[in-house]
Image (spheres, rainbow, N blue to C red):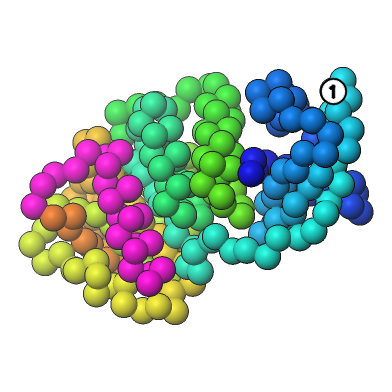
Amino acid sequence: MQRYFINENQINNNKVIITNGDYHHIKNVMRMKTGDKIIICPNNYRTFLVEITEILKQSIIGRIKEEIIENNEMMTKVTIALGFTKLSKQEEVVRRLVELGAYAYIPVIMARSNIKIRDNYNIKKERLERIVKEASEQSKRNILMKVHEPTNFSTFIDYSSEFDLRIVAYEEERNNKELSLLLKNNKLKNVLVLVGPEGGINKEEIEVLKDNYFNIVGLGKRILRCETAPLYLMSVIAFSLEK
């Protein structure tokens, strides 16, 4: 059954109003009729079965039939931070992170980031958010993964203090900790993971990360690309914490 994320203000008592892209998808792509049923998520962990009652020129009206009791979200909120890189790489990472259950995504401007933020980044962020919505509907999420604005490294370090566990992927040090051992604590409420940009993380940044309680982990014998490493880490974390 088709799933659509909408704003809470599109629900009034048991009446649901669907507009814009979702309206087009329901009417012109899925070619639904009155009486058909869809699933609606207002991005607050609640999920509803909705029956279409009217198809108007610019909106679709539905009626909530029942609340669906389900929880497809991870108990631990995992935020993935990636050294700022070009949009095409971010798009693929964001799509897969949604499918794997990540709670939030943060692009971090680091010393070796080789891409500058353009004046039109808000348009690019909107595209990432559209990808999040599409992937969330496809993968039956109950909430939308948050997409943060790009942040500089020092601000990111300040933000990291809010997390129970902080992890950074870094291959240049022998005393790396085993990721599986760090994830044995099944009471973790939130986890922060940092992967460097295409050029990697420099030594000065690693020292700052160590001073701020980041655990350095390796990702095996092979070197992973910057768009592969976040997905590897998220997969391991999800597998470990959702047993």
Nearest the camera: 45 or 230? 45
Residue at image point 32% right, 72% down = 183
Q: Quadrant of residue 127?
A: top right
State whether residue 143 appears in this view.
Answer: yes
Specify whether 100 is left or right of 123: left
Residue at the spot 44% in from the left edge and 40% down from the top edge: 94
Magenta range: 221-243
Which corner quadrant holds the N terminus? top right
Q: Position of residue 243 (x, y in %)?
A: 38, 72
The crowding category of the residue bearing disc 1, from other C-alpha atoms within 10 Å (few below 14, some 14 to 19, many at least 20), is few
Q: Is residue 156 visible?
A: no
Residue type, numbered disc 1: Gln
Residue drawn at x 53%, y 22% as measured from the top left: 119
Residue 100 painted magenta: no
Q: What kind of element bears circle 1?
A: loop
- Seen from the viewer's position, the closer of residues 101 and 48 is 48
Q: Is residue 193 above or below residue 99?
A: below
